[in-house]
Amino acid sequence: MWHLDKVFNDLTIVAIPTRTNFRGINIREAALFRGPAGWGEFSPFTEYADVQSEPWLNAALEGAYLPWPKLERNSIGVNATLPKVEIDRVPEILNRFPGAKTVKIKIDDFENDSELVEAALDFNPDFKVRLDVNGGWDLQTALLNLYNFYLRFGKIFEYIEQPCLRIEDLRELKKEIPMKIAIDESIRQALSSDFSDAKEFADVAIIKWAPSGGIKSANKLIEKIGLPAVISSALDTGIGISHGLALAASQNDLNFDCGLATTSLLESDVVTPPIEITAGTVLVSRTAPDEKLVAKYLASADRRLWWQNRIERIWESGFGERWQSEQLD
């Protein structure tokens, strides 16, 4: 039989400050461990329940234990990510994504965030712009806000990410607006859906390596949904990002810049070689923790215990037995 300490070799918990408040996060915690294929990362957000976190653990184990699939390219175009920040910080943030041709902007509404879009376009008038609403609007609010954004900025929007959570609202919205709709939460919160009608309420699928359960599961999901995919991340360290890059590199068709440069939003990464953006692209390669950086950002003893207990709970809930049986097949 396998034993937990043998599966999660060199388990290390890091806690890295973010450069901005990102979805309420000021410290990004992640569990890193080593397997025969390399390093894996387990980093579901702390508020996620154990059941929600299972796909993330599956992805982490896949990353550590299985080789990557065939890669169709060795570099990936990436978008800049602009959180909700003070306007005078926009150049500082966007300068961390050198050469990016696309920007994703986190917004709440037109009244509060149109100036954020304006500032991004002042920084680069040629930006393709994505607005990320994280499901924050109902149908009428979405129509009002998107009408105002379109009236002010015109056809600069590549897509609007998850404007509404309800599928019925998205379906109606798609009939009314001149922008494409991308879905993220609609996928992550319903992984077992058949998505046979996805084209009726969305144009683009946002796929993330860890929440999807790993590269193999993500590629099955992309095929099932049947929409063009944008590979994105969940504020991972460079370990998780490397697997996201491999997922993007495994696609036969990749027509959008990917959201795989979010380590730029962290105070530092903890990997070598570092994830570097050159002319809006990132090279695809496996990474490993850097001892000095890990020592600098090592989580406190109580947080290390919290993550170890979290992994153990999920493992002993039946997940570990299922995973072990798959390894022996």
Image (cartoon, grey):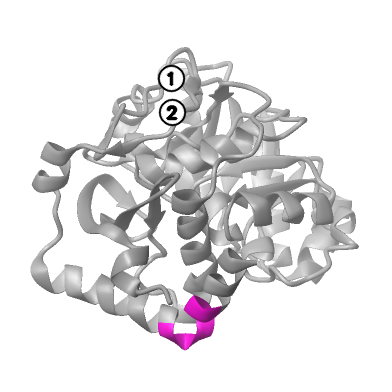
Give residue 74's quadrant in the image: top right
Q: Please report contact status of discs 1 and 2: CB closer than 8 Å, yes or no.
A: yes
Secondary structure found at label 1: helix
Q: What residue lies at 67% left-to-right and 46% top-to-bottom?
A: 160
Q: Nearer the viewer, residue 276 or 294?
A: 294
- Placement of 4 over or under 11, stated as above or below: below
- What is the crowding at mark 1: few (fewer than 14 residues within 10 Å), some, or many (at least 20)? some
- Secondary structure mostly seen in the magenta stretch: helix
The CA span between labels 1 and 2 is 6 Å
Q: Position of residue 85 (x, y in %)?
A: 33, 43
Q: Position of residue 191 (x, y in %)?
A: 69, 68
Whether residue 187 is visible to the viewer of this picture, yes or no, is yes
Give residue 310's quadrant in the image: bottom left
Give me the disc on residue 273: none
Q: Is residue 318 magenta?
A: yes
Total numbered labels: 2
For label 2, the residue is 119
- Placement of 68 over or under 328, stated as above or below: above
Q: Amino acid at mark 1?
A: Phe
Q: What residue lies at 69% left-to-right and 71% top-to-bottom?
A: 190
- What is the crowding at mark 2: few (fewer than 14 residues within 10 Å), some, or many (at least 20)? some
Magenta residues, start to end: 316-321
For label 1, the residue is 123
Quarter of the image with the C terminus is bottom right
Q: Is residue 166 left or right of residue 281?
A: right
Quarter of the image with the N terminus is bottom left
Whether residue 109 is visible to the viewer of this picture, yes or no, is no
Q: What residue lies at 68% left-to-right and 64% top-to-bottom?
A: 186
Q: Is residue 156 left or right of residue 6?
A: right
Q: Position of residue 202 (x, y in %)?
A: 80, 52
Q: Is residue 135 left or right of residue 6?
A: right
- Placement of 321 over or under 87, stated as above or below: below
